[in-house]
Image: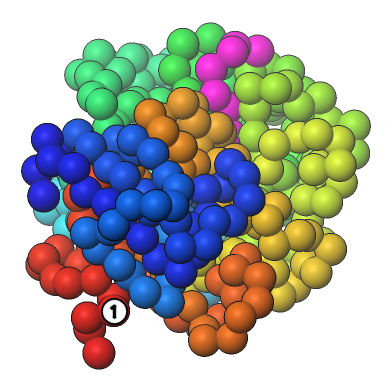
Amino acid sequence: MSETEHLRVTARWLLPAAGEPLQNAVLEIAQGSIVSLGAGRKADIDFGNAVILPGFVNCHTHLDLTGLRGLNPPGDDRTEWLMNVIRFRRSLTEDEIDNFVAQGLAETLRHGTTLIGDITGDGRSWRTIAESPIRAIVYREMLGLPKERAEQAWQKAQSWLGESTATDRCRPGLSPHAPYSTRTSLIRAAGSAGVPVAIHLAEFLEERELLEEQSGPFKKFLQELGVWDPLGLARSPEHVIRLLNGSEPTLLVHGNYLAPTAPIPDHATVVYCPRTHESFGHQPHPVSDLLHRGVRVALGTDSLASNPDLSMLGEMRFLHAVRPDLPARTIVEMATAAGAAALGWLDRTGTLEPGKFADFAVVPLPVEDSDPLEMLLESTHEVAETWIAGQRVFPRQQQPGLEDQG
């Protein structure tokens, strides 16, 4: 199908993520966008006993760390884990980075994700991602706690922004890495740069100890790296939020140990990575309290340095199993509409509505007749197809709908 043609697809269930589930509804597509959804029209493709839902949104990835799968499992020593990540990144050639990003993209599309927020160490993943079918914000990471290092990081980031022109699928952003590695002036500059921002925040208890008391294992870690400068530290994770005083979409990644009264503005989103959170053995995540406060929470996988795969469906199912207090619809929304809003894309994707891009995933369902949201989250069926702008991107080869596959 070309983007100028009409296509109508249907399945047993359609989950718009912007209303009630629809049974046997037809999704009509033209020129890569959704024209209508409803009953009464013959479909060109019937996916059969499956659910069609918005393509998943992975708000937090590090695709250039794809090669670390299973090699650096999180343990009690946070600084040792961080040092291993640093060593790995420093060991990579440019070709290796490109290959890892491409591998991560292929896995991401295979798992039904159509929009990502990817943090790249030196901006190199931009080219590979921008040339792929996926939608993305690519955040160039910035590190520098001492003043001179912070100034150098800002100069490099500005050059990268000048070279990375936004397209209809890929937009540039900035990521001051974390409060323990980034000077307050650099965090403030990122928040005022007029581009989306992502920062690892309140990820570890040791981070709060460092900021509030200037002590603990992170201080020793920074001293050993030769980058200790207490004058550059924020006073707390909540102080960091106030430093990011712009109005562009802002991701507060992890938020495991935010204060209950943390001042989270409307343009900011807490990104919860459930399986990474579990792998580090953190205290229970404050997701329920945040949602009760009206704070937007979206989901991410984090990198393969802390997660077994890049499946958002895996994150959703894990969260459904360990947090029965969260309604199934809320979990699905955190991986679709909330994620799109977090990245500033909700006007074009994240829900299945007329006028939005035809970005969707198809997941087979069990045979039993029950709530489609519960069936989606409690089954073990993997994503069968991924579509972006009305084009099938996984599987790549053209093949019939699920009902014809035996």
Disc 1: CA contacts within 10 A as few (<14), some (14-19) or many (>=20)? few
Residue under pointer 1:
403
Please say which color scheme the image uses: rainbow
Most distant residue in the front direction:
40
Label 1 element class:
helix
Instruction: Say if 53 sits above or below 304 in the image.
Output: above
Q: Is residue 201 left or right of residue 104?
A: right
The boundaries of the magenta stretch are 245-251
Q: What residue type is disc 1 on? A: Glu
Is residue 249 within the magenta segment? yes
- Vertical comparison of 220 with 327: above or below: above
Name the one closer to the observer, 109 or 149: 109
Quarter holding the C terminus is bottom left
Residue drawn 63% across the image and 51% down it: 20
Image spot of residue 331 (x, y percent) = 66, 57
Q: Taking 180 as reference, is 221 above or below it?
A: below
Residue 73: x and y in percent read 52, 74
Side of 91 relative to 228 (left or right): left
Q: Nearer the viewer, residue 388 or 61?
A: 388
Q: Quadrant of residue 5?
A: top left
Which residue is at a point 41% across and 33% down the rendered structure image?
A: 354
Note whether residue 264 is visible.
Answer: yes
Q: Position of residue 346 (x, y in %)?
A: 49, 31
Would you say 262 lies left or right of 389 here?
Answer: right
Q: Main secondary structure of the magenta part?
A: loop
In percent of width and height, residue 371 lies at 66, 70
